[in-house]
Image (cartoon, helix red, strand yellow):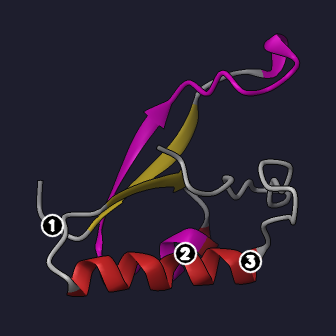
Amino acid sequence: MHLAPYVTARKMRTGYDLRGFNAQSQVRLRHVFEELDQRGCKVLLSNSATPFMRDLYQKYTIVTIAANPAINSDAGKRGHVEELLVMNYVP
């Protein structure tokens, strides 16, 4: 389940949430991630491979993968992008 919109190289997509989802919202999501970690849950989060996201989750395990997102309304603009898998465990 995706809990938040992806950060892109140009901007943060905010249309997934009626109230918007900005950088501060991403920081709040990281706090939820940390709280789940402290409770002993295994947590996996995916997002775009941007410096902002790498910095936000730097103390966790980060794996970069190639993704084929199918969410662009213009099918011709869909292509391979790098995505981060952030986890609080070693795979």
Q: Is mark 3 on a helix, strand or loop?
A: helix
Residue for point 79% across, 72% down? 22
Percent across and percent down for residue 81 are 59, 36
Residue 73 inside the magenta-drawn segment:
yes
Percent across and percent down for residue 84 are 45, 53
> In front: 28, or 59?
28
Mark 1 or mark 2: which comes first in sequence? Answer: 2
Mark 1 or mark 3: which comes first in sequence? Answer: 3
The residue pinned by badge 2 equals 29
Disc 3 to disc 2: CB gap under 8 Å: no
Disc 1 to disc 2: CB gap under 8 Å: no
Choose mark 3 or mark 2, whichever is in front: 2
Distance CA(mark 1)–CA(mark 3): 25 Å
Magenta stretch: give its range: 53-77
> In front: 81, or 71?
71
Q: Is mark 2 on a helix, strand or loop?
A: helix
Residue for point 39% across, 41% down? 65
The residue pinned by badge 3 equals 23
* Disc 2: CA contacts within 10 A as few (<14), some (14-19) or many (>=20): some
Answer with the quarter of the image where residue 43 lies: bottom left
Distance CA(mark 1)–CA(mark 2): 18 Å
Specify the farthest residue to the top: 76
Residue 89 numbered mark, or none: 1
Residue 40 inside the magenta-drawn segment:
no
- What kind of residue is marked 3? Ala
